[in-house]
Amino acid sequence: MVEIEETSGNPDPVSRRALPRIPVGQLLRAALDLLFPPLCLKCRARVRHAHSLCAACWSEIAFLDGAVCVKCGTPFDIDPGGETVCGPCHAQPHAFAQARALMRYDDASKGLIIAFKHDRLHHTPAFGAWLERTGQGLLAETDLIVPVPLHRWRLWKRRYNQAAILGARLSLLSGVACDPLVLRRKRPTPSQGAMPTAKARRRNVLGAFAVPPEAKPRIKDRRILLLDDVFTTGATLNACARALKRAGAAEVNVLTLARVVKPA
Ligand SMILES: [Zn+2]
Ligand SMILES: [Zn+2]
């Protein structure tokens, strides 16, 4: 038997001296861990700390923490040194200044991200903490976090916008404000995943985003961090960045959980 700290009553002085003092919080945590042991976010194996991956799943995730293109964040196989820009960024500049992603979008990470999009909201604390670490440099130069919006029909169907959930969490952790109402999706667009080419993806979201007039003062001359779950070709993120800049934003950077990396 262990004793918790108490401030009233008339305890037996002998047993009080003999027993160790354990803070109430630790005791509750131990009891909760017994009832609901922390499980790996991906494979559900038992782990030591809640909101984490087991060692095996962690080692499968390709975190993008090596050398990347200074603009779009695509990883380089060999570190070219300095602030190098990749070929595609030279050929077709983006509307955003810089993009960074936490991990590669591949077979190891796909399940985690798709589950979060549909019902696994308990991934939020881990994703938030990882994003804060990956986005440290960008967050230091951000006035406002803006999640990529869903069209209201899709929001109604899905019940929540995963990017807005991440934005709220990142705001809590970083202290940078988040405004999910700054950007609006004017029309429902077919899923970008259904588009056969990069050109079709660009056309699909052309003019799909806008900043409503009442939101313009909130972004004028401000540095925006655009947030989404996956960077695929960048078509959606470029369309959002373009709308934000047209409405007066000083600069737009991008942070995503994952990014598709095309084989070189
Ligand atoms: Zn695991
Ligand atoms: Zn690039």
Image (cartoon, grey):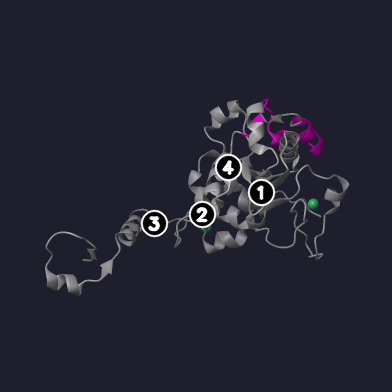
Split into 4 quadrants, where in the image is the C terminus? bottom right
Label 2 is placed on what type of residue?
A: Cys
Residue 246 in percent (x, y) is at: 76, 34
Separation of marks 3 and 2 at Cα, in angstroms:
14 Å
Q: Earlier in the sequence, mark 1 or mark 2?
A: 2
Foreground mark, 2 or 4, reads 4
Cβ atoms at labels 2 and 4 below 8 Å apart: no
Q: Earlier in the sequence, mark 2 or mark 4?
A: 2
In this rendering, position of residue 50 left or right of residue 112: left
Label 4 is placed on what type of residue?
A: Cys
Q: Residue at image x 75%, y 29%?
A: 207
Which residue was labeled with disc 1? 255
Residue 126 in percent (x, y) is at: 52, 53
Q: Residue at image x 70%, y 31%?
A: 209
Does mark 2's beta carbon lie closer than 8 Å to ligand 1? yes
How many residues crowd mark 2 within 10 Å: few (<14), some (14–19), many (20+)?
few
The magenta-colored residue range is: 182-204
Separation of marks 2 and 4 at Cα, in angstroms:
32 Å
Separation of marks 1 and 2 at Cα, in angstroms:
26 Å
- Image quadrant of residue 200? top right
Foreground mark, 3 or 2, reads 3
Foreground mark, 4 or 3, reads 4
In this rendering, position of residue 90 left or right of residue 2: right
Q: Secondary structure at mark 2?
A: loop
Which residue was labeled with disc 2? 43
Cβ atoms at labels 4 and 3 below 8 Å apart: no
Does mark 1's beta carbon lie closer than 8 Å to ligand 2? no
Which residue was labeled with disc 3? 37
253 in the magenta segment: no
In this rendering, position of residue 90 left or right of residue 38: right
Q: Earlier in the sequence, mark 3 or mark 2?
A: 3
